[in-house]
Amino acid sequence: MERYEKAFLTACAAVLVIFLCALGYGSVGMGVHLPSYSGMIYCDVGQKLRKVLRATPPFDHIGVQQIAPGKYQAVVIAQTWSFTPDEIDVPVDADVSFVATSSDVIHGFFIPGTRVNMMLIPGQVSEFDYRFTKPGEYLLICQEYCGRLHHTMSGKVVVK
Amino acid sequence: MSTSIVSEPSGFALPQSQLNVIKWDIYFGFAVLAIGVIMGLGQALGYAHVNVVKYYPVVKSYYQGLTIHGVLNALVLTTAFANGFLALTTARGLGRKLNNALLQAAFWTLFVGSILAAYAMLAGKASVLYTFYPPLEADWTFYLGLALVVVSTWLTSAAQLFALRAWRKDHPGERVPLLAFMSIATYVMWDIASVGLAVEVVVFLLPWSLGLLPGVDPMLDRTLFWFTGHPIVYFWLLPIYVSWYGLIPKQAGGVLFSDTLTRVAFLLFILLVPVGFHHQFVDPGISGGLKFAVAGVTFAIFFPSLMTAFSVMYALEIAGRRRGGKGLVGWFFTIPWSDPSVAAQVLAMIAFLLGGISGLMNASYTMNMEIHNTAFIPGHFHLTIGCAVALSYMGIAYWLVPYFERRELWSRRLALFQAFLYFFGVMIFSRGLMAGGLEGMPRRTDMVHASYALAAWKIPGIMTGIGGTLMFTAAMLFFFILVMTKLAGKEIEPSDLPFTATVQAPPTVGWQPRLDRLGYWVLASLILVVAVYGPFILGHFPPRLTTAGLLYP
């Protein structure tokens, strides 16, 4: 019976290694990236994070800007219980870089039906690149509990 | 086939004073569960756009109810059950009572801590959910209460370790009895894992809520939380593994195959404590390399659970074949399905297969982006803690309460029906949440009042509501059966724990006795903790406090 035991455990280990390789292939080979480190904005005790943010690039210019042909940057600030701006207009088939942060508690930045799913942590800049291939109106919601009106915190992304 | 008994203290009976503390730990946990599931009904129906929370006394918002549900069910119940049940299995396994003063202190610490946290939550001063991420701020009584809940586990662990030391003195050269080994290893794992939460609460949140610290460091505190927040699921799970490995084979009429394999599984849980970063896959301030490394550790911790699947299923197969089961799967139908304690726990195992697989999906960070903070996540963990663990608690209670009360279980048939009802309830509930989550339905959201809804969430939401209602009904039946057992159960002779025997006894020579030297494994675990968390902690030192925040959200 010990033979079965060994065979089972070897098979299990092999399956896990295969899964891990698939994950590695997904992130390196297919370029599926996670939101990554894009800098910190420090706000020391006594300062208002909101004010500090508005004075720090890129959050001094919120909204959508074209940064190169076919490339756009959407800069968003989240606060209880809204996104600024709450409507983001981008062209179809363009590379959109979402750069966002929070000015108070932890929020989320999630566009259901896409891979755009970030945590917005006060003091940290989140960035994620995405390309919308279908025109339409997409829902943008906060997916992290942020207080009593959390369920009203939403916006939209309009892809034309 | 020669068999040896896992532990030899045959006929050892615990003194009544010790049994009383253990009994009250467990009963307190179940009392708390009763409140937790009433809250849970409100959340499940909320996904179906039925608002029952507005009829609840005291509870003023969805999030207040959700906080009570999570804190009571996931933190207080699990701690109370582990403190009681693993004190019992340790004492019975070693054949000696634990220090009763420590166990009593653990009970009262847990009790006072729970009352403090409950006060804050009911007063509406702590609607921060059971993850209480700063800078959402709760009343200091909430944080102090949670700290006391953690302290109660350390007191229990100390009682176990003192008993182990005394046992070793009396039994030089002998292997630690398996039942006690598993129980003690669970707490040793938790001792390491709980440090993150303890530091977060005692060093940052408690002083902050008392006005002694001007702010918090949200990223650092979130990381400290998840240092504990993932291994905590093993603290929920391992007491159940103790039952699955150490008791269920006997209840089903089988034996456990390998003593060594069982010990190795528990040691791997101690070794692989630092897995928590996978809850922060979509956090910005953590590098991609670290995220990949932690995905690796998370996959590795799946391994001891696969070992468990083998060992426990094999033990059940032995039982089924002894009872006349034939063929490749025939044995599965001949295990004693008419015993509600066995049926409940085997159903819990089936749920855990699905729960484990969906957990692996969460750990795959590429997939994590699709489901992070969607309803998929509670769909997953209601299969694990909400079914594998909770239904096992119920199955264990079906022999444990008769053991405490010396009364026969009242209505085995109803208990059996209860177990199946709960199981199917969870299946429908989790299926709904997962289907919704894949369509982007968020978790932790008051859907009744939400300013948005997608058409694709409608049917999953209704399934969630129906499944949750079945779970609630089954839970209420469970409490009814326990109360009726106490009031109307037939009196029986004092009974013993259902001890399992192993086919292969633990060798006392060679390398294997070293498995019992928990200190080596703790050291190895600490090295891994430093390797994974060291660079992050160094990079975040000193903490940058921010005054942003929201009091009593």
Image (cartoon, coloured by chain):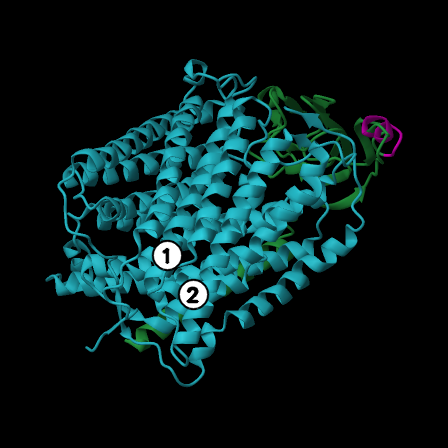
Quadrant of the snapshot with the C terminus of chain A: top right
Q: Position of residue B196 (x, y in %)?
A: 62, 50
Q: Does dot 2 land on a helix, a strand or a loop?
A: helix
Colour seen for chain B: cyan
Foreground residue among B422 and A119: B422
Q: Residue at x 38, y 60 (%)?
A: B90
Image check: A144 left or right of B348? right
What is the crowding at mark 1: few (fewer than 14 residues within 10 Å), some, or many (at least 20)?
many
Subunit under mark 1: B
Residue B135 location, quadrant: top right
Q: Which residue is mark 2?
A: B265
Q: Chain of mark 2?
A: B
Q: CA distance from mark 1 to mark 2?
A: 10 Å
Q: Which span is picked out in magenta?
A: A49-57
- Overall secondary structure of the magenta section: helix
Quadrant of the rendering where the N terminus of chain A is positioned: bottom left
Residue located at (37% from left, 34% from top)? B31
Sequence-earlier tag: 1 or 2:
1
In the image, A103 versus B527, the foreground residue is: B527
Q: Which residue matches tag 1?
A: B241
**Three-letter amino acid code of the residue under disc 2:** Ala
Q: Is there CB contact under 8 Å for labels 1 and 2?
A: yes
Q: Secondary structure at mark 1?
A: helix
Chain A: give its colour: green
> Residue placed farthest to the left in the image?
B324
| B490 with respect to B431 (left or right) | left
